[in-house]
Image (cartoon, helix red, strand yellow):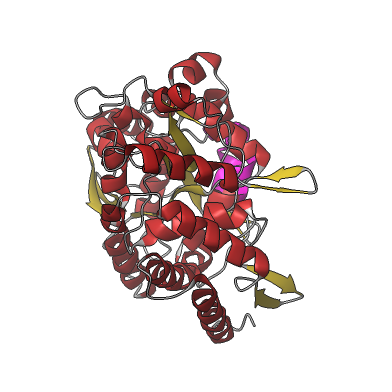
Amino acid sequence: ETIKLPEKIHLRAAMIDELRERKFREMLPDFYEKFKEKYPEVKDIKVTIELYGFEDLYNMQVAALSSGSKEYHVFQFHHPDMALYSQWLTDLTDWFMEDKDEIKLDDIHPLLHKTHMMYNGRYWGVPTHVNPMVFAYRTDIFEKEGYSVPETFEEWIEIAREVKDKYAPEIYGATLMLKKDIQISCTFLNFLGGHGVYLYRREGDRYIPTINTPEALEALTDFLEAAKCASPAATTYGFDENMMAFARGEAATTIMWSSILGVWRDPKQSNIVGKFDFAPHMPGTRKNGQLISKALLGGWTVSIPKAIDDPYKVAAWEFLKWLVSPELERKLVPYYESCRISLLSDPEIQKEWPNYKAFLEILNAGPIDFPGVPPGEKIIPDYEVLDHMTTKLSEVVTGAKTPKQALEELEQEYIEIFKKYGMY
């Protein structure tokens, strides 16, 4: 049905404070122009994009959405939280079906439909700022020492120890995000996936934690061994600190979000321009002759709260479509990967931006998703699960707990969380 739009519309959007989102702000005049072409009756269209850190964004959104606030018309949220958020969001399934040709819905990678757009068979938002974690290494050091790109955690740890013994404190074997925040959990999930472990197994409607298994213990032991090859300062490293430690040339290897490529290639910020590369896949383990490797899939979904009035929903929907339009996604190539197959597989883009090729390969191979699940699985207590994991990993890295102790405690905590949500 047609909804009459007022002469003046001012949208408020809450988003994560990162490079791509800052670019959205700069490009808003392009959105205003397109919007006025389609809705000439709207004389004054404005979008204010407010940027928040990870935890602040989550806490603010849960409070605003659960209270039915109309303060924000657009929310960008961490995609695994869709299970929790969907109860407060506008179901966009019919909107997607109606505009699928305009959106070029089939051009969005099918795995991202499952992970970043859908829950319980319905569409809730568009994926933007999507990317994987990658294993990065210093090509100059690897060439000098005659190292091959490690296939397994075991091979990687052996190289990292050797580099540390030979070059530290100038260059450590690895640098990792080991600060007590979500990034330590993000890093560990690559180890969990590479050991062929997920967070739980399902028996009918029952979720049984599998975090305290021999494979999970091997994963945590490998994680700890890799951490020992890093600078003692790494226990204070979150996203920015780790990105810059590798950029300064302080380590031979790292696990990092692929979106940092632009920083590492910028001579103003980086000492390693032309001296690093991404491995074709994350290190993993060999089982029965097969290599198991699962990189963590990250990213954000942009959605529309259920509580806002219909004219604002129409305007917000136009904004969502603009955010993932092929034209804007092409302009944003240097600012993180695209959700679109046409751009991820474009040979020209792949040549200049190898993170596009890496992301496409990871999507096609099947990554591990938050908080340690197969892609497309979503649980309501995602954030709680990650929060508990972060605390335990921090205790292991600082020596307060042994890996075995940490996993035993984590298993009990997960059973309690799952019970609380009727999942156990």
Nearest the viewer among 107 and 147 is 147
Furthest toward the top, the residue is 348
Which residue lies at the image location 55% right of the left edge and 82% below the top edge? 421
On screen, residue 358 above or below 65 = above
On screen, residue 205 above or below 332 = below
Question: In the picture provided, is 393 more to the left or to the right than 44?
Answer: right
Nearest the viewer among 262 and 288 is 288
Would residue 298 be counted in the magenta stretch? no
- In the rendered image, residue 362, in percent from the top left (x then y), is placed at 59, 38
Q: Is residue 346 visible?
A: yes
On screen, residue 78 above or below 65 = above
Which residue lies at the image location 47% right of the left edge and 22% below the top edge? 143
Nearest the viewer among 90 and 81 is 81
Q: Is residue 6 visible?
A: no
Q: Which residues are magenta?
A: 95-114
Nearest the viewer among 74 and 285 is 285
Q: Dividing the picture into quarters, in which one does residue 141 lie?
A: top left
Q: Dividing the picture into quarters, in which one does residue 14 lie?
A: bottom left
- In the rendered image, residue 160, in percent from the top left (x then y), is placed at 45, 42
- In the rendered image, residue 238, in percent from the top left (x then y), is placed at 30, 53
- In the rendered image, residue 276, in percent from the top left (x then y), is placed at 40, 26
Furthest toward the right, the residue is 288
Which residue lies at the image location 38% right of the left edge and 72% below the top edge? 395
Q: Main secondary structure of the magenta part?
A: helix
